[in-house]
Amino acid sequence: MKLICPIAGVGKRLQPFTYSKPKAFLKIAGKKLIDHILIKLKKTFPQGTKICFIVGYKKRQMTEYLKSQYSDYFKLHFVEQKPLGYSADTPYFSGLGDAILLTKDFVNNEDCFIFLSDRLPMEDYTSILLNFHQEKCDGIFNIKRVKNPEFYGVIELDENKKYLTRIVEKPKEFISDYAISGAYLFGKSMIPRMFELLEEQRKIKIENGQEHIITPVIEQLIKEGVKFTINEMHSKILDFGRPESLLEGNRQLLSELKLKDPLYDDLRQSGNIIDSKIVPSVFIGENTSIKDSVIGPNVSIGDNAIIDKCILSDSVIGDGTHLKKIISSKSIIGDYSILEDLLKKNITIGDSSYITTSNMKSF
């Protein structure tokens, strides 16, 4: 079985964080999003499994990091999705359908498992593989009931609740609350026809803001009699595609962490936490110092940060940040940002931002 990860896009919904890095590089609970996903895959697939990453935006950052971290376990392949054009120096791409089409030679008519970089199941991917081999089907999708189906591709099932009869991308009217959740497994029996349809779709001219998605291809395969079934995930599937869902994912990951030192007593003894209160669940990165502050619950702090006289909860704080006299919750603060004297919820700023009322000499 071949694995495919489309990871070329800019991640517009996560701007300004993605101005300087791919969205899969956002760091939550001590690890990049792509790390959380690949750790799950290592629990499911054997060493030597082949993965093809479809890269584009920040391709050099992505390929160098993946090669340095995962080439000892997976056999890595990379194909580049070229931008369709540029808008204010930001590239835009032609969508998931065209991305998958680029892997035709890599797949070579074998079973293929496609996973998305902004969806993370709290359980691993074992169940979808087991169900695929146990069921009489041509393919299988991870699905999950969701509260906001308008953000997802949703499905309808037959009367036996087994096979897909319809799939609709981001419906404006309610169709179903069963959403495809970040993983598709296509059997080799239907792979040639899938790539034929993707090739036909690619010839349709599109403009900025439009994409060749995979949903119409799946819909056509269903009409032609291809049998797709479902693997319903019962634990949470975290969605990191939007700032608000990223914060929810942060809360879930922190709740799952089994820290040996949840109150960070060791850091207090080393002098890195001084006169501060830590309210679990909290993750504090390496070489981070905290003074005269209240941190938590549900706060992820990156490496080499300096936190002074702050009260923070339900937030994600990047590497190398300098925060002084900040009272905030539900905030996402990018790497190497400097903030001082703010009393504000829902702060959302990208990397290397600077908001201060002084020259920050204390730092």
Image (cartoon, rainbow, N blue to C red):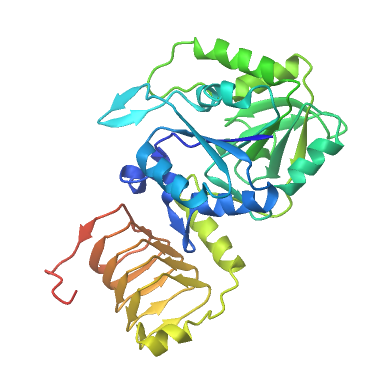
Asked whether, in this view, residue 280 is left or right of residue 93, the answer is: right
Among the 4 quarters of the image, the one containing residue 299: bottom left
Given residues 5 and 300, the one toward you in this image is: 5
Given residues 350 and 198, the one toward you in this image is: 198
Given residues 276 and 186, the one toward you in this image is: 186
Asked whether, in this view, residue 359 is left or right of residue 36, the answer is: left
Residue 37 on image: x %, y %: 57, 50
Residue 211 on image: x %, y %: 47, 23
The image shows residue 136, relative to residue 120, as above or below, that is above
Residue at (76, 47) in percent of width and height: 127
Q: Quadrant of the N terminus?
A: top right
The image shows residue 195, relative to residue 346, as above or below, that is above
Residue at (64, 39) in percent of width and height: 183
Residue 12 on image: x %, y %: 39, 38
Q: Quadrant of the C terminus?
A: bottom left
The image shows residue 118, relative to residue 296, as above or below, that is above
- Residue 156 seen in render: yes
Residue 254 on image: x %, y %: 55, 66
Residue at (42, 39) in percent of width and height: 11
The image shows residue 337, relative to residue 51, as above or below, that is below
